[in-house]
Image: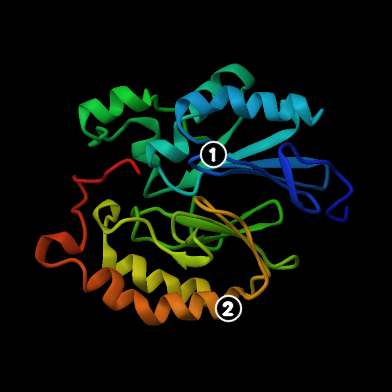
């Protein structure tokens, strides 16, 4: 079935793709009779997602999978509510799954955990680089977290980038250095993304980017060593595996 023949929940971006905006963008992608929900925001956003589906007259039962780009609470926080109340299967990269389902203790500071009301959720599918979820290709882009991934539609040249790549004031950038698990890996992952032929970028933060993606990413790759690696020093070049921050 061609994309665009099925309605997606949220604010339309391109055929078959809609955005549920907020501090973190959540997206829906519909194709072939199935809808995928990419990221879920903080826990309080779960009900906003449900309202977006109702407002678009799209049943939650149409969601085949929730796809997390990474484990941080501002991206996975709403998953527990959606899994519990609508029995939706949840997928993320195998390296982030222990943080999502609680097998590994959440290292987020207590006050931040309380503010974000972090709830863990069972992971149905642990993904690896190169896996396919419906029409979407899983591309492992570690650095922000060990299991950060982007979801790429090779035919339609659409990229859901999570926090591997975000938009700010018309430029592409990465989240603040203090939130990276490994800045070196995060910067290296930009080159992996550059290998993809992208026409529509759907970032975790900021606004969607249509057109001129390659030039914008080339600009970020050029300035990233000084802007990110050069800004950090010593232990600030990336957090160790027990020091992740939920942002």
Q: Residue at x 28, y 51 (%)?
A: 179
In-front residue for pair 127/221: 221
Disc 2 is placed on an element classified as: helix
User: Is residue 76 rendered to the left or right of residue 17?
Assistant: left
The local secondary structure at tag 1 comes to loop
CA distance separating discs 2 and 1: 26 Å
> Which quadrant holds the C terminus?
top left
Decide which of tag 2 and tag 1 comes sooner along the chain: 1
Give the residue drawn at x 21%, y 33%.
109
Residue sitting at the far front: 169
Density class for disc 1 (Cα within 10 Å; few <14, some 14-19, many ≥20) is some
Relative to 102, 205 lies left or right: right
| Marker disc for residue 214 | 2
Q: Residue at x 29, y 27 (%)?
A: 113
Left or right side of 63 for 181? left
Q: Residue 186's spot in the image, x, y percent? A: 35, 65
For the view shown, which residue lies furthest in the left direction? Answer: 234
Total numbered circles: 2
Q: Nearer the viewer, mark 2 or mark 1?
A: 1
Residue ranking furthest to the top: 85
In percent of the image, x 62 and y 29: which residue is there? Answer: 49
| Residue wearing tag 1 | 22
In the rendering, at what x and y percent does residue 82 appear? Answer: 57, 24
Residue density around tag 2, few if under 14, some if 14–19, many if 20 or more, within 10 Å: some
**How far from the left and from the top, in percent, is residue 146?**
34, 54
Residue 92: assigned label:
none
The colouring scheme, among rainbow, by chain, secondary structure or one colour, is rainbow
User: Which image quadrant for residue 200?
Assistant: bottom right
Image height check: is 170 above or below 86? Answer: below
Q: Residue 59, how many percent across, how many down?
A: 77, 26
């Amino acid at each position: 079935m061609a994309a665009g023949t099925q309605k997606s929940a949220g604010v339309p971006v391109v055929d078959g793709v809609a955005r549920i905006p907020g501090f973190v963008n959540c997206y829906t992608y519909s194709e072939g009779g199935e809808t995928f929900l990419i990221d879920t925001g903080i826990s309080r956003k779960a009900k906003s997602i449900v309202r977006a589906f109702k407002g678009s007259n799209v049943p939650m039962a149409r969601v085949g999978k929730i796809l997390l780009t990474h484990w941080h609470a501002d991206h996975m926080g709403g998953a527990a509510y959606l899994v519990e109340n609508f029995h939706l299967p949840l997928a993320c990269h195998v390296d982030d799954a222990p943080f999502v389902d609680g097998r590994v203790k959440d290292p987020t500071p207590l006050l931040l955990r309380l503010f974000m009301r972090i709830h863990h959720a069972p992971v149905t599918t642990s993904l690896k680089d190169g896996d396919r979820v419906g029409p979407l290709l899983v591309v492992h882009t570690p650095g922000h977290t060990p299991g950060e991934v982007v979801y790429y539609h090779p035919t339609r040249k659409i990229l859901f980038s999570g926090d591997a790549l975000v938009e700010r004031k018309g430029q592409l950038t990465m989240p603040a250095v203090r939130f990276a698990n490994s800045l070196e890996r995060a910067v290296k992952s930009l080159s992996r993304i550059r290998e993809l032929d992208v026409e529509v970028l759907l970032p975790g933060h900021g606004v969607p980017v249509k057109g001129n993606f390659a030039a914008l990413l080339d600009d970020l790759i050029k300035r990233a060593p000084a802007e990110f690696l050069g800004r950090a020093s010593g232990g600030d070049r990336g957090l160790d595996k027990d020091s992740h921050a939920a942002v």
